[in-house]
Image: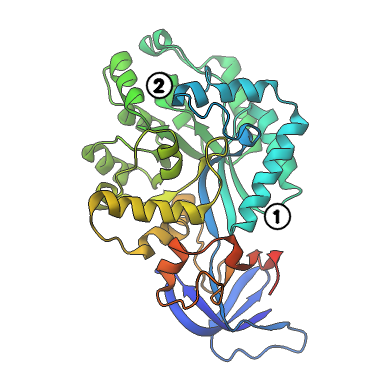
């Protein structure tokens, strides 16, 4: 397949190329240059007016709670999503598997239509939860990174006494990790140091929520006399999620000891918990990606996430931010965390989105990075491609 006369955001720096040709073969970008001559059997498409960008990466989701959209909207964060006491937990336990899969499937379809080609899900429900999501993924063409979880949450007294992970739960973890891409831990406040250190020995991807609320930081200090983030780092996580209330020193440590931080600004705002300090994260040289978090409280839309993050950060700090930095968070920065190269360049998997530059909301497009970050929506998407195959729309 050759896409002629297409604009491209090229490479890890998302360099704007106004017009070129892109050859896709065997699911990968083969060549990106002008004047590529097709073979006799090769399809060629004239893409004048289209902009090819990397597929968007939703680096943190909980799509299992798609069944509970806007339930308990006026409740506190713990009342909504606490892994033991929250409304979400109770709904998930009572819901029929067929109901859960139906609404998870809808969320996956929604993400594809919004240009998301890969999502990272913190999967509740043990092996059954993983299998439900895998069942959904047989019906929707989207890439997933599934981070499983042992349904085991310790009480403060167990954490103080540094209780180990029971043998039964160790066996559960071993089976879970055979079925998924890694482990997504709820937080340090539900796990003793011993449990976190045990989890840290697992060989697959490791991630954990941390410093999401003032209350969670307070609980950590009261129970263990230690910082929540420093305790979370005992997991040796490849990435941390949220980090709204992390201190500068904690961010400096996170920048050195992890691949990055995934922030979820719209979800944090919807929970009335604050906004990630993007300026401080950038100053401390953290690699930042973005996610949409719980479908229960937020739509899985990375375009809206980028728009919100860009504007609210500038509004709070009264400083300009290059929109390209925001777009990197939704593409190449996520690749650094997941150790997958999502940039549009020869040799990489052909996951991409073709945007209509003549869309009513985008034309005339003077600043492509800004236009994508704060003007683009799913209505401007002409096609979504995963592995060189069009999975939504058409050229």
Give the CA separation, mark 1 to mark 2: 36 Å
Q: Where is residue 174 in the image (x, y as percent from the top left)?
A: 60, 28
Q: Up-down: is 29 above or below 324? A: below
Q: Nearer the viewer, residue 108 or 179?
A: 108
Q: What residue sits 75% from the left and 47% below the top?
A: 138
Residue that numbered label 1 is attached to: 141
Q: Which mark is residue 189?
A: 2
Horizontal side of 163 relative to 252 (left or right) equals: right
- State yes or no: discs 1 and 2 in contact (Cβ < 8 Å): no
Q: What residue sits 64% from the left and 91% below the top?
A: 37
Compare marks 1 and 2 and give the one earlier in the sequence: 1
Q: What residue sits 54% from the left and 14% below the top?
A: 166
Q: Where is residue 283 in the image (x, y as percent from the top left)?
A: 23, 52
Q: Position of residue 46 (x, y in %)?
A: 65, 85
Residue 364 appears in the rendering = yes
Query: Quadrant where the N terminus lies?
Result: bottom right
Residue 87 occupies which quadrant of the picture? top right
- SS label for mark 1: loop
- Mark 2: give few (<14), some (14-19) or many (20+) Cα within 10 Å: many
Q: Nearer the viewer, residue 158 or 357?
A: 357
């Amino acid at each position: 397949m050759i896409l002629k006369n297409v604009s491209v955001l090229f490479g890890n720096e998302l360099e704007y190329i106004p017009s070129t040709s892109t050859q896709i073969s065997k699911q990968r970008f083969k060549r990106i240059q002008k004047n590529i001559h097709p073979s006799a059997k090769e399809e060629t498409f004239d893409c004048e007016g289209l902009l090819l960008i990397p597929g968007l990466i939703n680096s943190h989701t909980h799509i299992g709670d798609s069944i509970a959209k806007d339930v308990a909207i006026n409740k506190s964060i713990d009342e909504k999503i606490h892994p033991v006491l929250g409304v979400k937990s109770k709904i998930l336990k009572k819901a029929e598997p067929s109901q859960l899969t139906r609404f998870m499937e809808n969320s996956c379809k929604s993400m594809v239509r919004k240009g998301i080609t890969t999502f990272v899900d913190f999967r509740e429900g043990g092996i059954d939860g993983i299998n439900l999501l895998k069942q959904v993924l047989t019906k929707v063409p989207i890439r997933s990174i599934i981070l499983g979880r042992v349904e085991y949450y310790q009480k403060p007294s167990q954490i103080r006494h540094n209780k180990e992970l029971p043998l039964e739960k160790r066996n559960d973890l071993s089976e879970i990790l055979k079925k998924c891409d890694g482990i997504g831990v709820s937080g340090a406040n539900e796990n003793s140091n011993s449990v976190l250190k045990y989890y840290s020995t697992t060989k697959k991807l490791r991630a954990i929520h941390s410093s999401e609320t003032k209350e969670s930081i307070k609980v950590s200090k009261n129970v263990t006399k230690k910082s929540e983030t420093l305790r979370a780092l005992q997991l040796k996580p490849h990435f941390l999620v949220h980090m709204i209330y992390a201190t500068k020193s904690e961010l400096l440590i996170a920048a050195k000891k992890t691949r990055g931080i995934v922030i979820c600004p719209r979800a944090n705002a919807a929970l009335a918990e604050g906004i990630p300090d993007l300026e401080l994260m950038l100053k401390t040289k953290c690699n930042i990606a973005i996610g949409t978090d719980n479908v229960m409280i937020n739509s899985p839309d990375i375009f809206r996430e980028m728009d919100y993050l860009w504007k609210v950060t500038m509004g709070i700090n009264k400083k300009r931010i290059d929109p390209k930095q925001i777009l990197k968070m939704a593409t190449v920065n996520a690749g650094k965390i997941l150790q997958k190269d999502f940039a549009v360049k020869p040799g990489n998997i052909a996951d991409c989105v073709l945007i209509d530059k003549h869309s009513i909301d985008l034309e005339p497009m003077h600043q492509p990075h800004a236009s994508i970050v704060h003007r683009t929506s799913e209505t401007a998407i002409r096609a979504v491609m995963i592995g060189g195959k069009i999975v939504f729309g058409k050229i």
